[in-house]
């Protein structure tokens, strides 16, 4: 049956009886109509014409009022899928804008640090080389200072490269990159980070990057918000999917957090995983005896069949 005919049919049934069964059918019809591209205007037109037809045979004012109310409820049920899709699109737009702003701020910081640190060290190295070239006797001390300065430039450049895109991720894969990430977070702060699991071989590059960025954001949240003493990153390769779970033993998320904070870091991850067919969940975990105390968990999942589809493509940050 064509979609508009289905709408007419469902509405006619609904006008006869607005029971739970017909309500659920209306909501389901809304979802499938959205997927097949039926627009809101088409809905309004179809509902309007069915209501007009029914009104012609409905004469008592009570029945007319009941009909109007039922048509309104029907539309609300059907259009709830559109409302959710609209909310999702709005969140995705916000996350994208936030991500772009974050990348801009990050690029600006790297550019400034390159200028202020590596750039200044290079100027000093040039000066030492100049002094060495013009030294009437004993250029060695100047050359050795220039050498030391160039060593510092090299280590700064390594750090910048690491921050932009860890070479270990491309060279050795997700697990070594996550271990390096965990170690660097643990040495910078007061949080112990354990990294467990196995990918059973390399994953497609976009999947590795997406799961790495997931762990990076989740661990950065642990540092910023949780007050945790311990965080754990667990990677599991299952028959049809790969999963990355980040858990901590901190304060957890409360409902008021979710209302007060727009969660653009986490929403950004959802948008990053979406093109891979992946998904993400987050929230508080109940206190488990003998395990970590109450804290938070973030679980990202990517299906492996999608991974194959993307295996030859590359998504960068
Ligand atoms: N591990 C955690 N422990 C406790 N609260 C958390 C944790 N992770 C996230 N939250 C809560 O969820 C909110 C949303 O996190 P999200 O990463 O989306 O945004 P953010 O970290 O506040 O900002 P940013 O956009 O810079 O990431 C946080 O502000 C915090 O209140
Ligand atoms: Mg965050």
Image (spheres, grey):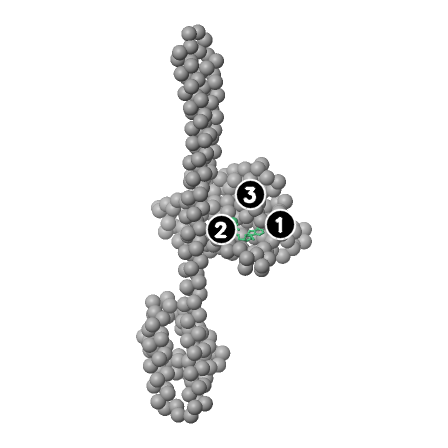
Q: Earlier in the sequence, mark 2 or mark 3?
A: 3
Residue 280, how many percent across, how many down?
Answer: 49, 55
* Residue 187: quadrant of the picture: top right
Q: Position of residue 255 (x, y in %)?
A: 58, 60
State the residue at coordinates (51%, 41%).
178
Observer-side mark, 1 or 3, equals 1
Image: 146 above or below 198: above
Describe the element under mark 1 as helix, strand or loop.
Answer: loop
The quarter of the image holding the C terminus is top left
Q: Please tell me whether residue 84 is drawn above or below residue 109 in the rendered image.
A: below
Q: Which mark is first along the chain, 3 or 1? A: 3
Circle 3 sits on which residue? 195
Q: Residue at x 44, y 58 (%)?
A: 91
**Vertical position of residue 260 compared to residue 28: above or below:** above
- Cβ at disc 2 under 8 Å from ligand 1: yes
Real-space Cα separation, disc 2 to disc 3, in angstroms = 21 Å
Which residue in the structure is indicated by mark 1?
250
> Which x, y percent locates residue 118?
44, 29
The answer to whether marks 1 and 3 mark residues whose Cβ atoms lie closer than 8 Å is no
Q: CA distance from mark 1 to mark 2?
A: 18 Å
Please name the residue that numbered disc 2 is placed on: 265
* Residue count near mark 1 (Cα–Cα under 10 Å), binned few <14, some 14–19, many ≥20: many
As drawn, the label of residue 145 is: none
Does residue 118 appear left or right of residue 221 in this picture? left
Q: Are marks 2 and 3 in contact (CB under 8 Å)?
A: no
- Quote the CA–CA distance across marks 1 and 3: 17 Å
Beta carbon at label 1 within 8 Å of ligand 1:
yes
Res. 235 visible in picture? no
């Amino acid at each position: 049956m064509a979609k508009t005919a289905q709408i007419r049919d469902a509405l006619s049934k609904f006008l006869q009886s607005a029971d739970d069964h017909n309500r659920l059918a209306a909501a389901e019809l809304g979802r499938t109509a959205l997927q097949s591209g039926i627009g809101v205007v088409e809905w309004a037109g179809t509902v309007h014409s069915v209501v007009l037809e029914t009104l012609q045979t409905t004469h008592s004012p009570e029945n007319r009022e009941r009909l109007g109310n039922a048509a309104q409820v029907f539309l609300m049920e059907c259009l709830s899928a559109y409302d959710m899709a609209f909310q999702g699109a709005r969140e995705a737009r916000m996350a994208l804008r936030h991500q772009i702003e974050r990348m801009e701020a990050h690029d600006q910081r790297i550019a400034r640090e390159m200028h202020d640190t590596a750039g200044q060290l290079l100027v000093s190295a040039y000066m030492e080389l100049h002094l060495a070239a013009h030294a009437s006797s004993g250029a060695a001390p100047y050359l050795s200072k220039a050498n030391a300065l160039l060593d510092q430039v090299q280590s700064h450049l390594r750090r910048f490269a690491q921050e932009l895109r860890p070479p270990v991720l491309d060279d050795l894969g997700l697990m070594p990159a996550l271990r390096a990430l965990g170690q660097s977070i643990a040495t910078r702060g007061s949080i112990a980070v354990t990294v467990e699991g196995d990918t059973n071989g390399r994953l497609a590059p976009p999947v590795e990057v997406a799961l790495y960025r997931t762990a990076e954001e989740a661990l950065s949240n642990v540092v910023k918000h949780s007050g945790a003493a311990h965080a754990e990153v667990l990677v599991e390769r299952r028959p049809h999917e790969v999963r990355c779970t980040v858990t901590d033993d901190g304060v957890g998320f409360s409902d008021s957090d979710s209302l007060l904070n727009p969660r653009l870091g986490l929403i950004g991850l959802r948008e990053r995983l979406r093109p891979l067919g992946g998904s993400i969940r987050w929230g508080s975990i109940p206190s488990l005896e003998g395990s970590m105390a109450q804290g938070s968990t973030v679980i990202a999942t990517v299906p492996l069949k999608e991974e194959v589809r993307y295996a030859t493509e590359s998504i960068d940050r």
